[in-house]
Amino acid sequence: SQQGEEDPQALSIQEGENATMNCSYKTSINNLQWYRQNSGRGLVHLILIRSNEREKHSGRLRVTLDTSKKSSSLLITASRAADTASYFCATDARMDSSYKLIFGSGTRLLVRP
Amino acid sequence: DAGVTQSPTHLIKTRGQQVTLRCSPISGHKSVSWYQQVLGQGPQFIFQYYEKEERGRGNFPDRFSARQFPNYSSELNVNALLLGDSALYLCASSPGGGIQETQYFGPGTRLLVL
């Protein structure tokens, strides 16, 4: 089963509006990352937040992390048509003596011009 | 600097065949990971290699294998292809061995099994 689950599955907003996506996970983590994917191509890393951080900013992106609720949110402010993409959260999960990166099912964001 | 490169970009195979996918990491990166992404889902972790050794393996059958070469490039092999193996196969590299690090993804190889 997926470690991370994004909510909503799909989001449609008008250009200039803010977009908020949520991610929930199941086990304790070291880091949580957000990635963007355009039209089934490679993923682009957006931001990494460590388990001891509560909030992080990068340009128009703001990520929050609540480890007590095992959840994170990604806020994109003043959205643009170019922000149209799928957004995934990824968490590390321990397996035996190593870790694996587990992605959620993603939020598909459509920004209408 | 060149990003992660993957070849081929597209591939069509028939059931039962074997396929080899290739990945070249960003220069200086020693870790390569492979992911399978089925349409409409998030990427699923298949393997991680670091310094030519397997660091981690996801829940995939033994038909899936990989290796990393001295120049840190990597190959993913899939034997006895099934229809369900049709997917986008993504390769990602990172400087060190921690899978928790930022992963830099290639454009992927889209495999269609008929």
Image (cartoon, coloured by chain):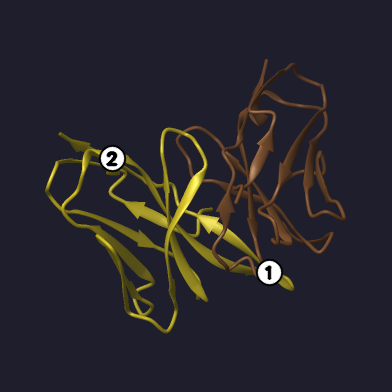
Chain colours: A yellow, B brown
Callout 2: few (<14), some (14-19), or many (20+) C-alpha neighbours within 10 Å?
few
Q: Marks 2 and 1, how far apart in space?
A: 32 Å
Q: Which residue is mark 1?
A: B96
Identify the image quadrant of residue A58. bottom left
Q: Which residue is mark 2?
A: A82
* Front residue of B63 and A74: A74
* Front residue of A16 and A1: A16
Q: Is residue A45 left or right of residue B43?
A: left
Give me the residue at 70% from left, 55% from top. B32
**Label 1: chain?**
B
Identify the image quadrant of residue B49. bottom right
Give me the residue at 73% from left, 71% from top. A96
Q: Identify which amino acid the numbered label 1 is placed on.
A: Gly
Residue that sits furthest to the right in the current view: B70
Tell me the element at label 2.
helix
Query: Where residue B42 sits: x, y (%)?
Result: 49, 45
Identify the image quadrant of residue A4. bottom left
Q: Is residue A12 left or right of residue B11?
A: left
Tell me the element at label 1.
loop
Query: Where residue A25 sits: x, y (%)?
Result: 43, 64
* Front residue of A39 and A97: A39
Callout 1: few (<14), some (14-19), or many (20+) C-alpha neighbours within 10 Å?
some
Q: Identify which amino acid the numbered label 2 is placed on.
A: Ala
**Label 2: chain?**
A
Residue B58 in view, yes or no: no
Q: Is residue A48 left or right of residue B33?
A: left
Residue A44 in view, yes or no: yes
Rendered position, B66 above or below A51: above
Q: Is residue A46 left or right of residue B63?
A: left
